[in-house]
Image (cartoon, rainbow, N blue to C red):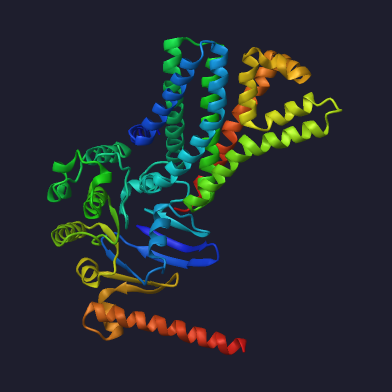
Amino acid sequence: MISVKNISKKFGKLQVLKDFNLEFRLGNSYALMGPNGSGKTTLIKTILGMVMPDEGEIFVKNQPIKGSHSYRQYIGYMPQIGRYPSNMKIGQLFSMMKDMRPEIKDYDLELVEAFELDQMKDKAMGTLSGGTRQKVSATLAFLFSPDILILDEPTAGLDPIAVEILKAKIKRERAAGKLILITSHIMSDLEELTNQAVYIFDGEVYFNDTIESLKELTGEVRFSPAIAKLMQWTLKKKVTKREMSHVETT
Amino acid sequence: MLKLLKYALYDILKSRFAMIYTVFMILVAVSIYQVSDDLSKVSLSLMNIMIMIVPLISAVFATTHFYNNLEFIELMLAQPVKRSHVFLSQLFAVILMLSLSIMIGFGLPMLLWGADTSLITLLAVGVILSAVFAGFAFLASVLTRDKAKAIGISLGLWIYFSLVYDGFVLYLIYSFADYPLEKVTLGLVMLNPVDLGRILMLMQLDISALMGYTGAFFQKFFSSSMGLLIAGGTLALWTLLPNLFAMRVFKKRDF
């Protein structure tokens, strides 16, 4: 569904993605993990075409995305921080997004009802709280029932009730056979919602397999310690790398 | 594209800034109309204010607008729409808003108290200068990642074209006063959209006689259709070049 091939990206001198290769398949749910600044959001943004890679190609549904914009109709994206025009009302924002995809007539209004956004449709976006804005972002991502869902820290800033509603929704979409990509630092959420783990560190893929095999590999029964162990390994590897280069230079 | 523009316009026209700017323009025009009954004096005073204020407001407003809307632009970029359309909708919304403010702010008093060709030229020059400086501002915005830096560059361009450049031209004219400089000055005027707008305005008034031989030369040049064509073409270039370049950068920019 999405294949990322040999993607490299530099921001100034900082190499964010190094010769990146990944394959995301329909019907799977991927947990995208890694410490802050490891390149998770950059990867998502290159898939969405918001960041242009220096090298490499990305294919969505076997079509190269370079110079194309129509492939984005298959993607529902929930950004980490959703900010919207402050004078625009919720209702107008929704009709605008519908306007952007005129060919889709069936809307998934489950979350609109669950989050009770209908009652707020005359509220201006600028007056909304951070959590309500997150609800709007989430609803927009699911509105067109896209085949691919990319959720960047979906549960951050939501109240517990909303988190449960959103998680239930993600689970339903997963059962419906969609491709789901989630980044989060909340391990319990990821364990609940995903079956594949992708661990990124320093712009490289360190782990890409099922969660089961991750647990096997690390010898842990639970997800959270397994990831912690993986993190420790990668950090150690970095330290040894640094020590060796130190030896070489002296 | 039109859909994007519709929503961008909707947001911008409801902003407090659009209201304040329009009211400010009305106040300026009304007070100047009150002071004098002579239309050519009115247009001269309006021109002097407009030629300073309009580029400044356009530059600062367009830059802040771009950065305030960055998240919205990002939202649009994640939708199935063309990048160039996202850019153009934002740009046109800004230019339309600035132009509308001038049209309403200066135009309403003109409708009430009368206008002549110089005042119509004034409106046209105001709209063009808005577009030119919105272009500079968008260019500064897409080239930097920092709002303060972008505003700095926009302000720098305004200071350069509105103040520094004139000083430079004056210095040149004084230093080479012994030589015939009409053509050189004409060339120099073409290199500055603000000066070009000002001269186009002045040529509509009768005061070009006060500018000596150069004034007569300018009068002759700008009243010929060839001269007007060249001046119009140059202004069009000043409008198009920064905007097109900004769009090119925007298409390749990372968000």
Q: Is residue B70 visible?
A: yes
**Residue A78 horizontal/vertical position (percent):** 29, 54
Residue at 44% in and 29% down: B96
**Residue A44 horizontal/vertical position (percent):** 38, 59
Up the image or down, B186 lies above or below B248; here it is: above
Quadrant of the drawing holding the N terminus of chain B: top left
Up the image or down, A218 lies above or below B210; here it is: below
Nearer to me, A35 or B220: B220
Q: How many marks?
A: 0
Up the image or down, A191 lies above or below A41; here it is: below
Nearer to me, B8 or A142: B8
* Quadrant hosting residue B231: top right
Hey, which residue is sitting farthest front in the picture?
B35
Up the image or down, B156 lies above or below A167; here it is: above
Residue at 57% in and 13% down: B40
| Residue A114 placement, left or right of B214 | left
Nearer to me, A20 or B196: B196
Residue at 56% in and 31% down: B52
**Residue A25 horizontal/vertical position (percent):** 32, 61
**Residue B159 horizontal/vertical position (percent):** 60, 40
Hey, which residue is sitting farthest right in the picture?
B178
Q: Is residue B121 visible?
A: no
Nearer to me, B125 or B155: B155
